[in-house]
Image (cartoon, helix red, strand yellow):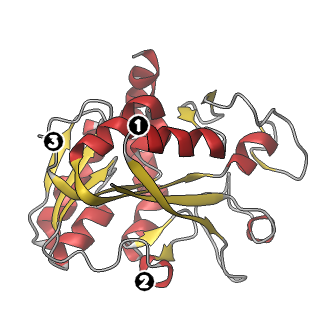
Amino acid sequence: MKYERRNRAFWDADADDYQAVHGKALGAAPRAWGIWRIPDDELGVLGDLEGRDVLEYGCGAGQWSIALAQTGARAVGLDFSGAQLAFARVAASSAGVEVAFVLASGERAPFASASFDVVFCDHGALSFCAPERTVPEAARLLRTDGVLAFSQCSPWVSVTYDDRRMRPTRRLRRSYFGMRKQSSPDGTVDFQLPYGEWIRLFRAHGLVVDDLVELRPPAHAATTFTDLGRTRHARRWPTEHIWVAHKA
């Protein structure tokens, strides 16, 4: 797909700069969600995954997967960027843990059906691949009662983003209805759906929605993702959310 080629090219070219800017913050809080690094221990999305088979579905440099492996999960990281995975493999070796990192698309994962207890990502495959392909693929990979959890930008960002100022604003700029594929200012192709379409897509593939966690940073929060990171704004209107569902 053209959008996958574009996204892969972007992430391969940007990997060094991305990790230089964001890698330290991501590594300092690896089991945490979103640009504000809100700990999973506070949110309770994934919880204790010791002894579970877990797929990070768009893992980047693998900070989450490595941290989960250190606490006893059988972690696998998938990403379509070989340059990002190179960082992941070095980091896993330095941490002294075994994580299988796989170069593949989230739309065509090279794993048998019902291989995982948890499929999750933090701004990963569900943001950069087509939802009508990734959601059924994630459902295929999950065992019965397995959990799908993923964070992404909120529709509030999509409909209020000012490309010139490179940040979400208080002004509506785009239609909420009909959201799907969008070209972002940084050069990627991102995917977003209205809430109702997400729910219908989950249901069509045997997934039951358990929660929608709208992330609100603490008042003192800071972020390296300055194109989204205005603490005052994000405390009034959600910048990110996490979908949580399970396979019935």
- Relative vertical location of residue 46 with respect to residue 160 in this rendering, above or below: below
Instruction: Identify residue type, mark 2.
Output: Asp
Q: How many residues crowd mark 3 within 10 Å: few (<14), some (14–19), many (20+)?
A: some
**Foreground tag (1 vs 3):** 3
Residue 236 placement, left or right of 102: right
* Along the viewing direction, whichever of 57 and 27 lies nearer the viewer: 57
Residue 5 placement, left or right of 104: right
Residue 107 placement, left or right of 196: left
Q: How many residues crowd mark 1 within 10 Å: few (<14), some (14–19), many (20+)?
A: many
Residue denoted by label 1: 11
Instruction: Identify residue type, mark 3.
Output: Ser
Q: Position of residue 218 (x, y in %)?
A: 67, 81
Q: Position of residue 28 (x, y in %)?
A: 40, 76
Q: Position of residue 148 (x, y in %)?
A: 37, 56
Residue 203 shows which numbered tag?
none
* Along the viewing direction, whichever of 33 and 107 lies nearer the viewer: 107
Mark 1 to mark 3 CA distance (whole Å):
28 Å
Mark 3 to mark 2 CA distance (whole Å):
29 Å
Q: Earlier in the sequence, mark 3 or mark 2?
A: 2
Q: Which quadrant holds residue 15?
A: top left
Give yes or no for contact between labels 2 and 1 (Cβ–Cβ under 8 Å): no
Residue sitting at x 45%, y 30%: 132
Residue 113 shows which numbered tag?
3
Residue denoted by label 2: 41
- Relative vertical location of residue 163 with respect to residue 230 in this rendering, above or below: above
Residue 214 can be seen in this image: yes
Q: Position of residue 136 (x, y in %)?
A: 35, 36
